[in-house]
Amino acid sequence: MLDSDAPHPDVALGERSSVAVRRTRAGPLGPKPDWLKIRPPGGQAYVRIKAELRARGLHTVCEEARCPNVEECWGGGTATLMLMGDTCTRACSFCAVKTGRAPAALDATEPAKSAEQVELMGLDYVVLTSVDRDDLPDGGASHFADTVAAVRERNPHTLVEVLIPDFGGAEGPLAALVASRPDVIAQNLETVERLTHPVRDPRAGYRTTLDLLARVKHLDAGMLTKSSIMLGLGESADEIRAAMTDLRAAGVDFLTFGQYLAPTRRHHPVVRYVTPEEFDRWRVEGEAMGFRYVASGPLVRSSYRAGEFAIRAVFEERRARAGTSRHGHTLDRQGVA
């Protein structure tokens, strides 16, 4: 039996999320276990890259979301750039990014600056993500597409993943983004269906994310897709399996699991610390379900360097099968599976 089959001491996992929140706040979990203890980021590469980002007015989700793997990724040729500013129009209860109804206007030079930063950092894999921008007619899809094009033009050998908003569920903006031909399109499910609200903003939705990921495959069957689930919010094992089944039904290729850690006391509380052994069992189960790769661990995040190694391996396999060194995603559109 997986650990998540057993109830947490403060709340039965099958109870309503509001009960879970109230009881957890009344009875804290206590100190983090050893496997969640990390040192603050540092090192020459981290300091240099942070200074370069600030000088160009760029933001990274690595910092805004307080990712525990930032030093590892930045030092290993991987980074996640956050587009469209640092203020989100939505207010998910798990997220540390600041929110506001009227974010600053888009920076028209951001696509070019992002491409320059990828080149300066020598990245072979970049994740482009963003805050939600419900104030924009297309949710920022065209800005994403422009950035993909700029990065691809200046860095032809860099793989580009986009971790996108839901664009309000509209297909037109999504189709425009798909047409820009990133290598991977990701949208995070975040949690199981029962806990979607209040964990996610009311404008986000469990089915909205699944429908978006399925539409990506409808628009381009060769596009690789990815999603992520946080554990420790009060979900049961059966609910996790149901979410995995739904993601596979939507054709999702890559999946990540990580421990939810509340950014501050004002955010949604942690209900349970999930052990590394349980994370490993979810990895095995996910791979058996047919995901191409599952990154699963307490400190794994949706943009995770180990997972990106696996994604690169898929493109290398495609190149080898095609017998050419051309870009793997282009080959896939020409019929290479």
Image (cartoon, rainbow, N blue to C red):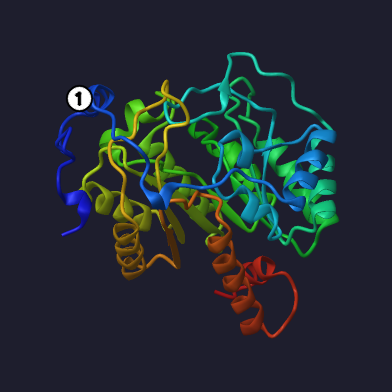
Residue 316 in the image: above or below residue 170: below
**Residue pointed to by mark 1:** 19
Residue 200 in the image: above or below residue 228: above
At a point 50% along the width and 49% down the height, the residue shown is 301
Residue 278, percent across and down?
A: 29, 58
Q: Which image quarter: residue 295? A: bottom left
Q: Which image quarter: residue 202? A: top left
- Is 26 placed left or right of 70 in the picture? left
At a point 59% along the width and 67% down the height, the residue shown is 309
Residue 171 in the image: above or below residue 294: above
- At label 1, the amino acid type is Val
| Near-viewer residue (175 or 47) | 47
Residue 169, percent across and down?
A: 48, 34
Residue 257, percent across and down?
A: 40, 52
- Is 288 placed left or right of 50 in the picture? left
Question: In the orientation shown, which residue stands out farthest toward the top?
Answer: 101
Per the image, label 1 sits on a secondary structure element best described as helix
Q: Quadrant of the N terminus?
A: bottom left
Q: Quadrant of the C terminus?
A: bottom right
At a point 65% along the width and 66% down the height, the residue shown is 329
At a point 83% along the width and 40% down the height, the residue shown is 113
Residue 140, percent across and down?
A: 65, 32
Residue count near mark 1 (Cα–Cα under 10 Å), binned few <14, some 14–19, many ≥20 = few
